[in-house]
Image (tube, rainbow, N blue to C red):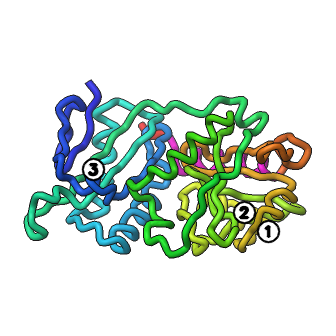
C-alpha cells in the first residue's frame, strides 16, 4: 500500500484525510513543489525548500515547519514506498479555515510515486508548443510563486494538448515572453542563451536555476532580458525546463519551425551537462 506523509506521520494513502474546510481545498490558498529523485536522492531539494519558504513568507502561508523537518519527511516517504527514481509532490496550506488563527495548524502533504518519464522521442526530435491565449498580469500577487491556484495553467495546458502540443507559452499583458504552463523557457540565438528574468514575473524554476549555473560554469553567454514574439520566431533553438522534463527541445512554435527543425547543438550540450550535474548531485549511496 502506498504511503504518504500527512502533517506529522506516515499513513496509508487510502486513510489520508484533509479537512473539507482546508484553505487549499476551498480557496487554492497553498503552495506546492514537484520534485524528482534519482538513486534515492532528491534533486536540488534545498533549492525547492528555499523557494517554498520564500513563498510562504511572501504570501503569508503560516506554518511551524522548518527545512530540516520537511527534508526528513521527504525521505521518509521515499523509503516507505521503496522508491529510488520517483516523482514527489509536497503540498503546504495554511490549514482548516474552521479553526481560529491561533489554533489553526498548517496542512503538510508529501507523496511519492514511481517516475513516469516523458517519451524518449520528445528529446530526440523535439516537441511542438503553441501560444497560450491567456496573459500574465504583472500585478497578480501569486505569479512567480508555485501556488495551488493552478487552474488557469491546467486549462492552458489542456488547450495545448488538444492541439497535439506538449506545452503552451504564456506572455504578459504587455506582450513579453514569460513561461510555459509548467515550464520555464530558454531561447538560443547566435550561440548565446536567453531567458526571461524572474521579475517578468516568472517562476524561479529549480531546473531553470540549474541551466543558468551550467551556462555560467561552461562560459556560455547567458542573458536574462525581456523577450518578445519576434525573439521567439528568430531563435535558432528553443527549449523548456522543469525538474521532471529536465531539458526539453522545441522543434515548432505553432506552424513555425524552430531553426532547422532538429535538436540544436546548444540544447544537446546543455542536456549532456545537465545529466552530468544530476549524476554528481544524486550519486547512488550504499
Residue shown at 31%/62% (left/top)? 67
Spot occupied by residue 152 in the image (x, y as percentages of width and height): 49, 52
| Label annotation for residue 25 | 3
* Left or right: residue 6 compared with residue 235: left
Task: Note whether 99 is above or below 159 in the view shown.
Answer: below
CA distance for labels 3 and 1: 43 Å
| Relative height, residue 85 to residue 108 (above, below) | above
N-terminal-most mark, 2 or 3:
3
**Where in the figure is residue 150, as x and y percent of width and height?**
44, 52
* Residue beneath disc 1: 221
Q: Are marks 2 and 1 in contact (CB under 8 Å)?
A: yes
Q: Earlier in the sequence, mark 3 or mark 1?
A: 3
Find disc 2 in the rendering and name its residue: 215
The residue mark sitting in front, 3 or 1, is: 3
Rendered-image quadrant of the N terminus: top left
Q: Main secondary structure of the magenta part?
A: helix
Measure the C-alpha gap from mark 2 to mark 3. Answer: 40 Å
* Residue 281 painted magenta: yes
Q: Which residues are magenta?
A: 266-283
Position in image of residue 29 (x %, y %) = 31, 60
Camera-nearest residue between 149 and 82? 149
Amino acid at each position: 500500500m502506498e504511503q504518504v506523509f500527512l502533517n506529522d506521520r506516515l499513513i496509508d494513502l487510502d486513510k489520508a484525510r484533509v479537512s473539507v474546510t482546508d484553505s487549499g481545498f476551498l480557496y487554492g490558498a497553498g503552495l506546492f513543489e514537484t520534485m524528482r529523485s534519482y538513486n534515492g536522492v532528491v534533486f536540488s531539494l534545498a533549492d525547492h525548500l528555499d523557494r517554498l519558504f520564500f513563498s510562504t513568507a511572501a504570501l503569508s502561508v503560516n506554518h511551524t515547519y522548518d527545512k530540516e523537518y520537511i527534508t526528513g519527511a521527504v525521505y521518509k516517504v521515499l523509503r516507505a514506498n521503496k522508491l529510488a527514481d520517483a516523482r514527489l509532490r509536497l503540498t503546504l496550506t495554511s490549514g482548516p479555515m474552521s479553526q481560529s488563527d491561533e489554533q489553526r495548524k498548517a496542512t503538510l502533504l508529501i507523496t511519492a510515486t514511481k517516475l513516469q518519464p516523458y517519451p524518449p522521442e520528445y528529446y530526440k526530435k523535439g516537441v511542438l508548443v503553441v501560444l497560450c491565449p491567456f496573459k500574465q498580469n504583472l500585478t497578480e500577487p501569486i505569479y512567480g510563486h508555485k501556488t495551488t491556484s493552478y487552474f488557469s495553467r491546467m486549462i492552458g495546458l489542456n488547450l495545448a494538448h488538444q492541439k497535439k502540443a506538449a506545452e503552451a507559452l504564456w506572455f504578459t499583458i504587455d506582450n513579453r515572453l514569460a513561461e510555459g504552463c509548467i515550464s520555464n523557457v530558454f531561447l538560443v540565438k547566435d550561440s548565446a542563451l536567453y531567458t526571461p528574468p524572474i521579475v517578468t514575473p516568472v517562476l524561479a524554476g529549480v531546473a531553470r536555476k540549474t541551466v543558468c549555473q551550467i551556462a555560467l560554469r561552461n562560459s556560455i553567454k547567458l542573458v536574462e532580458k525581456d523577450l518578445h514574439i519576434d525573439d521567439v520566431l528568430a531563435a535558432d533553438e528553443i527549449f523548456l525546463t522543469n525538474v521532471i522534463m529536465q531539458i526539453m527541445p522545441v522543434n515548432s512554435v505553432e506552424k513555425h519551425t524552430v531553426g532547422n527543425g532538429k535538436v540544436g547543438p546548444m540544447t544537446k550540450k546543455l542536456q549532456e551537462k545537465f545529466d552530468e550535474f544530476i549524476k554528481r548531485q544524486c550519486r547512488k549511496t550504499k
